[in-house]
Amino acid sequence: MTAPTESSADEMDGKIRQLDALFRPKRVAFVGASDKNLFSRRAYTQFLRVAPDAELPLVNPRTEIVHGQQTVKRCVDIPGGIDCAFMLTPADVTVSALDDAADAGARAAVIVSQGWAEEGPVGAVRQEELVAKARSRGMTLLGPNHIGFANLWDRVAPCSLGLELPTTPGHVGLITQSGAIGSSLVTYAARNDVRFSFVITVGNESMVDVSAGIQYLVEDENTRAIAVFAETIRDPQTFREAARCAAEVGKPIIILKVGSSQLAAATAQAHTGALVGDDRVIDAVLRQDGVIRVKTVEDLVCTANLAASTGPLRSSGIGVLSTSGGACDITADLGQDAGLSLPALDDVARARIEKFLPSYGQAQNPLDMTGGALADPEAWKEGLRAFAANQPQLGLLGVVTSLPREGEQQRIDTFRAVGECAAETGLPIAVFPQIDQDQSEYIRTVRDELNVQIVMPGVARFVTAASAIARWSKWLAARSARDPEPLTPQPMAIRPIRAGETLSEYDARALVAPAGVEFVPTVLATDVHEAIGAAEAYSGPVVLKMCSAGAAHKTELGGVALNLHTPAEVMAAFDRLADRADQHGLTLQGQLVSPMRGHSTELLVGVTRDPSWGLILAVAAGGELVEILDDSALRVLPVSRNEISSMLRELRISRILDGYRGRRSADFDSVVDAVAGIAAAAVGLGDKLASLEVNPLAVSEDRVEGLDILITTLADG
């Protein structure tokens, strides 16, 4: 990532100051507070849970006593003024109430009410008027249609989140578009002693969206991991920039992104359209930018909590010790599905473990400590030290044991051993039971007294979280070794395509050739004599193909004739393809004559335009089986050569490129060159490109060349 310019740094500082006014106010007023309003009652109780000594002005022009407290009629009546207004007013009076708050000094407002853009065009106009008013008064708005935020370190909580919100500050920053999901998340967090720096609900995101929230938490010194629940990402480019900023400081982002949709129908002609859907693009973007994606709210909380505790791991390997062999087996099985790396121990570590392990035990990872460890905390210490000492392949340890209850001294001794070994070795150690178990107040007391940093609900949550953090840590470590900048297409003689333009294969080849994309040699024959002459010029059998702007999938139309050896075979095939074109109502530009190629590995390389994220590069197992094999890798352009190489390595078919079962390996650099050329051509064709697809890209030991190409354009308008 390039260093920020002075102007961009100033712009960022300005945004941070605006959000400081919102998220770090010294004085908040509840405007429209009412005993009849559930959100008001809950928010009042919540604020005093978080800041029991706070002075909290209440504004209500009609009721003198609300929540047992004297009110004022207007914000301007509050002595000393306010910094932020928590607006509980109905939508139809909120704009005028905003003026009153601004007159009292507020530079930010949290708009709770519904009746805005979520209700359609009329509400959208009302929301635009609200934002215009806020901007004219120099105010920043959070919401509307949400339940506020909590800043736990500064003890500010204008929010109606569930009253189980942990009030002890921690290091997980949570941003959610859904207030209801936010309440569920903090309730689950409370049961598992997960502590937050911020909890921010953004609602309609009129001025502050998920991406802005991420950027703010990246700069917050108390936030070590950022958890996000999102139904949509409104500003993709700002989101990606925020993710890159988080990576720069080694701060993980964990997201639960829900919802999916299809790409525009303009790409439907290309096979790439079947490989690329909105959810797959999201996956590609998140993977490309190092964002951890999870599938459940529970995993969102647990993964963020573990990440906040560990930070980047020194290595991606995980070591697990347990008093149960069954738990070891479960960990290994779940780990295999999740991609958890459980590296073998070296001989020194195994010898050290065998000194205290019973004769029937196996010194391995995961390690069954056997039941004897329950009565011998020194065994735990020796096991943990053996895993930590001179085992650079391990970045995190897990201990499977039941959580303490009063009267169970052996569980407390295990916690003490974990706390001492974590401090001694510097390696993060998580403790968790076999089956999910909530943390009681007693467990919290024991863990804090004995300096146990990480307690998780159970094996499954640990495996999911640990594998994700290990992958992220590996990505982060490799990030600095990648190309410093993505490929920038050089100026080339590619004319931009026009909206609605249709291109035959022959014209498409000619258009992208300046980008350095190699294709199998071909001659466009307009009659049978030209076809025979072209075939005779090649040594060996040839292929004939229909050439028409209307023939997107020639094989399906019966528009390809293979392995033609003699002039008679070429003549017959030429006539046959011409007849089939007539049957399908196609106007032929001619027929393409190419040499028949031998066996090769077939790839699909395509670029399609996503309406939100821009040009998406897809590399997949190609040919006729592209949609059946479903073996693909996606990235958002632009990409570096190393990123293209990583894409190819993600494919199951990549093993064949390396010389599977005695075959000679392909020239991998030439494959990367071809993919880079196709990507560059797609960029060069301009903003009317819907998709560009080379399928197949034939890869053999001595050449890499496209056998077919399809270009589709966006329609006018």
Image (cartoon, grey):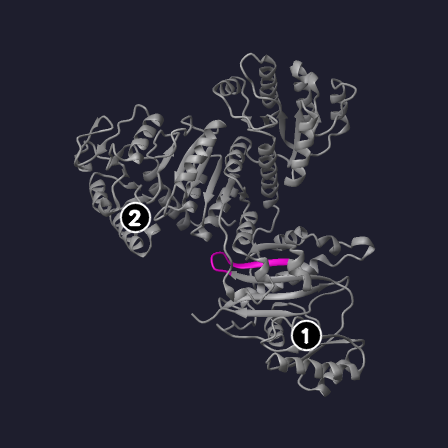
Q: Nearer the viewer, residue 713 or 434?
A: 434
The quadrant holding residue 548 is bottom right
Reply above or below: 504 against 398.
Answer: below
Q: Please state the total of marks drawn on the protein image.
A: 2
State the image coordinates of residue 1 (x, y, percent, origin top left). Answer: 52, 49
Whether residues under marks 1 and 2 lie with C-beta atoms below 8 angstroms apart, the answer is no
Q: Mark 2 falls on what kind of element?
A: loop
The numbered mark at residue 558 is: 1
Q: Mark 1 falls on what kind of element?
A: loop
Q: Residue at x 45, y 40 (%)?
A: 218
The numbered mark at residue 577 is: none
Query: Which residue was labeled with disc 2?
Result: 115
Question: Label 2: how many residues lie within 10 Å, few (<14), some (14-19) or many (20+)?
Answer: some
Relative placement, left or right, of 239 versus 697 is left
State the image coordinates of residue 254 (x, y, percent, origin top left). Answer: 51, 40
State the image coordinates of residue 20 (x, y, percent, origin top left). Answer: 35, 38
Q: Residue at x 67, y 53 (%)?
A: 651
Relative placement, left or right, of 436 versus 499 is right
Amino acid under disc 1 = Gly
Amino acid under disc 2 = Gly
Q: Nearer the viewer, residue 251 or 232?
A: 232
Would you say residue 431 sits in the magenta stretch? no
Reply above or below: 410 against 568.
Answer: above
Tell me the chief SS of the magenta region.
strand
Q: Nearer the viewer, residue 476 or 191?
A: 191
Q: Residue at x 71, y 81 (%)?
A: 576
Q: CA distance from mark 1 to mark 2?
A: 57 Å
Quarter of the image that includes the C terminus: bottom left
Q: Which residues are magenta?
A: 610-619
Residue 586 seen in the current view: yes
Reply above or below: 314 against 378.
Answer: below
The quadrant holding residue 395 is top right
